[in-house]
């Protein structure tokens, strides 16, 4: 299964991607996670990306495309992948198409997770992330058992630097301007699957899986 998840920040892409990759035993490739790891490790890439990320702006296409080109060529992506947060612009989608073509990989679907804007804002403002394992929580919608502590590994929970009101506004603006055009781009290629992202985690996951299977049946 080779799929891409598209949707605004806070639509639940990361959480849904985790459910899918655990079930199908395929890699979860999230460019945001790769960039945050580079910042934590204080690499040259991390220093370059941090300026954009803290403001909620997109990192330049050539930087992100370079990361993905290397990642997708690793053998674990042959059998499948879930891309989350990439592509985010038309040039990224075009470059990705070329790279996949060279590797002989065919996309099965591009899933668009749809969530109303008010819900996105609520989800982002209350999001907390584990500093150690990256698991995500929400202060009221999905709280950890102990305040500020990860249920899975005991790591410290923190609020992402870009989950502040100004960066959130910039990120949603970047989504509308640069990423939303991808919806038509993939619809025209017959790959788009639209899924309602409101509901319990498992319910949305089920909906997504059924929608992807329905698309596969239609095209096979
Ligand atoms: P995310 O974790 O997907 O919300 O991404 C966090 C931040 O990383 C974004 O606001 C961007 O600054 C940067 N980023 C992640 N993926 C991309 C991408 N495909 N293109 C450009 N910037 C990205």
Image (cartoon, rainbow, N blue to C red):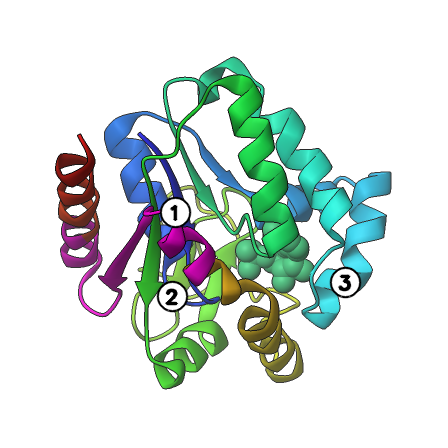
Image quarter hosting the N terminus: top left
Q: Gap in Å between the C-alphas at discs 3 and 1?
A: 31 Å
Label 1 close to label 2 by CB (< 8 Å): no
Nearest-to-viewer mark from 1 and 2 = 1
Give the residue displayed 40% in from the left and 74% down from the top. 123
Looking at the image, is mark 3 or mark 1 earlier in the sequence? 3
Residue 34, given in percent of the width and then of the height, sits at: 62, 41
Left or right? Give the position of 215 relative to 114: left
Residue 187 magenta:
yes
Percent position of residue 212, x then y: 21, 43
- Examine the image and state in which quarter residue 17 appears: top left
Quarter placement of the C terminus: top left
Q: Is residue 119 above or below residue 57?
A: below
Quarter, ligand 1 = bottom right
Q: Position of residue 120 (x, y in %)?
A: 41, 76
User: 72 or 19: nearer the eye?
Assistant: 72
Q: Position of residue 186 (x, y in %)?
A: 41, 52
| Callout 2: SS | loop
The answer to whether residue 206 is above or below residue 34 is below
Q: Which residue is mark 1?
A: 189
Which residue bears the numbered disc 2? 11
Question: In this rendering, is residue 198 above or below 100?
Answer: below
Earlier sequence position, callout 3 versus callout 2:
2
Residue underneath mark 3: 52
Q: For label 1, count other residues whose C-alpha is less than 10 Å away and answer few (under 14), some (14-19) or many (20+).
A: few
Q: CA distance from mark 1 to mark 2?
A: 23 Å
Q: Is mark 3 within 8 Å of ligand 1?
A: yes
The image quadrant that residue 170 belongs to is: bottom right
Q: Is mark 1 within 8 Å of ligand 1?
A: no
């Amino acid at each position: 299964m080779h799929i891409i998840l598209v949707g605004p920040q806070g639509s639940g892409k990361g959480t849904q991607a985790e459910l899918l990759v655990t079930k199908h035993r395929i890699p979860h490739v999230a460019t945001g996670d790769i960039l945050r790891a580079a910042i934590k490790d204080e690499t040259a890439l991390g220093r370059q990306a941090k300026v954009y990320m803290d403001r909620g702006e997109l990192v330049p296409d050539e930087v992100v495309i370079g990361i993905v080109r290397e990642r997708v060529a690793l053998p674990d992506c042959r059998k499948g992948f879930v891309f989350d947060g990439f592509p985010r612009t038309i040039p990224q989608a075009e470059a990705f198409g070329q790279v996949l073509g060279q590797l002989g990989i065919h996309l099965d679907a591009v899933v668009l997770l749809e969530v109303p804007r008010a819900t996105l804002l609520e989800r982002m403002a209350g999001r907390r992330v584990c500093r150690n394992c990256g698991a995500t929580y929400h202060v009221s919608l999905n709280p950890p058992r102990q305040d500020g502590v990860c249920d899975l590994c005991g790591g410290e929970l923190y609020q992402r630097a870009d989950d502040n009101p100004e960066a959130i506004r910039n990120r949603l603006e970047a989504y509308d301007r640069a990423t939303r055009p991808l919806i038509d781009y993939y619809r025209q290629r017959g790959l788009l699957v639209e899924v309602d992202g409101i509901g319990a985690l498992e319910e949305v996951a089920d909906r997504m899986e059924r929608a992807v299977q329905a698309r596969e049946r239609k095209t096979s």
